[in-house]
Image (cartoon, rainbow, N blue to C red):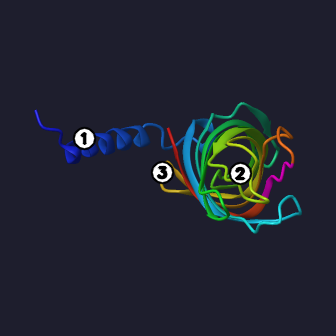
Amino acid sequence: MRFRPFRVGSVLLAALACLAAGAADAPPWATSAISVESGLLWQVGQNTPLSYRLVPTQLSWRSKRNFGRTFADGSNLLVRHRLTLLGTWVQQGPESHYIGFIGSPSIEWWNKANTWCWFGGAGGGFGWLDSQAWPGAQGQDFTLNWMARAGVERVFGARGTLSAGIMFQHMSNGGQTRPNPGIDAVGFTLGYAWSF
């Protein structure tokens, strides 16, 4: 039997369409979501003399509303769990890529109509990059990371949302080598999420 990628892709798309049609009337925060975000970050601060430029891509899972509060005007302030697989292309710098994992809350304020929200959150994790023996570069492959993000998210279609935000990312080896240059970078992200 021959492998037919077109048929497999068609079946996967049909399955996603069925999932998306499942609960279209529920607010976006009432179900879990998978999102893809990417952007561009520039080196800031004095941790390294190198001028890094990073292109992060995040594949994230957000839980449904974990806890929160509904206000008298019908708006909602809530917290959701967020787990992220982070892949970063080092566009400018001696290394070329970074793969990491991050856990963080997603704090969201949704308007009464549940059509848009302000979001924010900060968290940390660990990862690996292809460290290079270069002055000012990272000292080893294993790193710790920390990030903060904030922005706006808008409902797009029955089960989707579009987002735009700012992101701060820190990577270092936690003082395991001397020197411990680290990377601090800030920039923008754009994303799309699917609720299921």
**Residue 167: where, in percent of width, then height?**
74, 58
Q: Residue at x 48, y 38 (%)?
A: 23
Specify which label sits upstream in the sequence, 3 or 2: 2
Query: What residue did someone put label 3 on?
Result: 158
Find residue 30 and report its horizontal and vertical position in percent. 61, 36
- Residue receiving disc 2: 112
Task: Determine the image quadrant of residue 174.
Answer: top right
Q: Position of residue 145 (x, y in %)?
A: 75, 44
Q: Quadrant of residue 118?
A: bottom right
The rendered magenta stretch, by its main secondary structure, is classed as: loop
Residue type highlighted by circle 1: Val
On the image, the x and y values in percent for residue 84 come to 63, 41
How many numbered discs, if any?
Answer: 3
Residue type, numbered disc 3: Ala
> In 3D space, how far apart are the residues under numbered discs 3 and 2 (Cα atoms)?
17 Å
Dot 1 crowding, Cα within 10 Å, few <14, some 14–19, many 20+: few
The numbered mark, 1 or 3, whose residue comes first in the sequence reads: 1
Q: Residue at x 77, y 60 (%)?
A: 185
The residues tagged by marks 2 and 1 sit, at their Cα atoms, a distance apart of 40 Å
User: Residue drawn at (41%, 38%), measured in percent from left and top?
Assistant: 19
Q: Nearer the viewer, mark 3 or mark 2?
A: 3
Residue at the limit of the structure toward the right, as seen here: 46
In this rendering, the answer to whether 27 lies above or below 151 is above
Front-lying residue, 189 or 153:
189
Q: Which residue is mark 1?
A: 8
Q: CA distance from mark 1 to mark 3?
A: 24 Å
Q: Residues within 10 Å of mark 2 (few under 14, many from 20)?
A: some
Q: Which residues are magenta?
A: 179-184
Q: Residue at x 84, y 48 (%)?
A: 180
Which residue is farthest left? 1
